[in-house]
């Protein structure tokens, strides 16, 4: 994965969830794929797996965020 692609994903997470939570979600999700390596050291299969896991986490947390907003707006 290129650093540019990683930064694009990071921007989407931080715009949606805030700086601290967005970075926490990204790092906690990516730990099992990265395993003490940098994002630019991944092969294409690991790259795909990481993006899939990040996409799933984003959708999961976005649903939770929407539920919280709906709960508080009542």
Image (cartoon, rainbow, N blue to C red):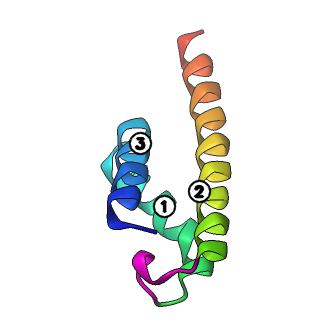
N-terminal-most mark, 1 or 2: 1
Q: Residues within 10 Å of mark 2 (few under 14, many from 20)?
A: many
Q: Write the residue at 44% across / 75% down.
A: 39
Q: Quadrant of the C terminus?
A: top right
Please provide percent x and percent y for residue 34.
53, 81
Pinpoint residue 73: horizontal percent, then vertical percent. Answer: 54, 12
37, above or below 5, in the image: below
The answer to whether the residues at label 3 and label 2 have Cβ atoms under 8 Å apart is no
Alpha-carbon neighbours of circle 3 within 10 Å: few (<14), some, or many (≥20)? few
User: Element at badge 3?
Assistant: helix
Residue placed most toward the observer, 5 or 66: 5
Residue 15 coordinates in the image, percent (x, y): 36, 38
Q: CA distance from mark 1 to mark 2?
A: 7 Å
Q: Secondary structure at mark 1?
A: helix
Mark identifier at residue 38? none
Q: What's the mark number on residue 12?
A: 3
Disc 2 designates what residue?
54
**Mark 1 nearby-residue class (10 Å; few <14, some 14–19, many ≥20):** many
Q: Residue at x 64, y 36 (%)?
A: 64
Please state which of residues 61 and 55 is positioned toward the viewer in this rendering. 55
Q: Mark 2 falls on what kind of element?
A: helix
Are the residues flagged by discs 1 and 2 in contact, CB closer than 8 Å? yes
Cα–Cα gap, marks 3 and 2: 11 Å
How far apart marks 3 and 1 lie (CA) works out to: 10 Å
The circle on residue 26 is 1
* Residue depicted at x 55% and y 71%: 30
Residue 64 versus residue 14 in the image, above or below: above
Callout 3 touching callout 1 (CB < 8 Å): no
Range drawn in magenta: 37-43
């Amino acid at each position: 994965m290129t650093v540019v692609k990683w930064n694009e994903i990071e921007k989407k997470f931080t715009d949606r969830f805030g700086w601290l939570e967005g970075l926490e979600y990204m790092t906690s999700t990516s730990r099992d794929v990265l395993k003490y390596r940098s994002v630019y050291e991944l092969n294409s299969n690991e790259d795909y797996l990481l993006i899939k896991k990040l996409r799933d986490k984003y959708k999961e947390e976005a649903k939770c965020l929407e539920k919280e907003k709906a709960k508080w707006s009542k």
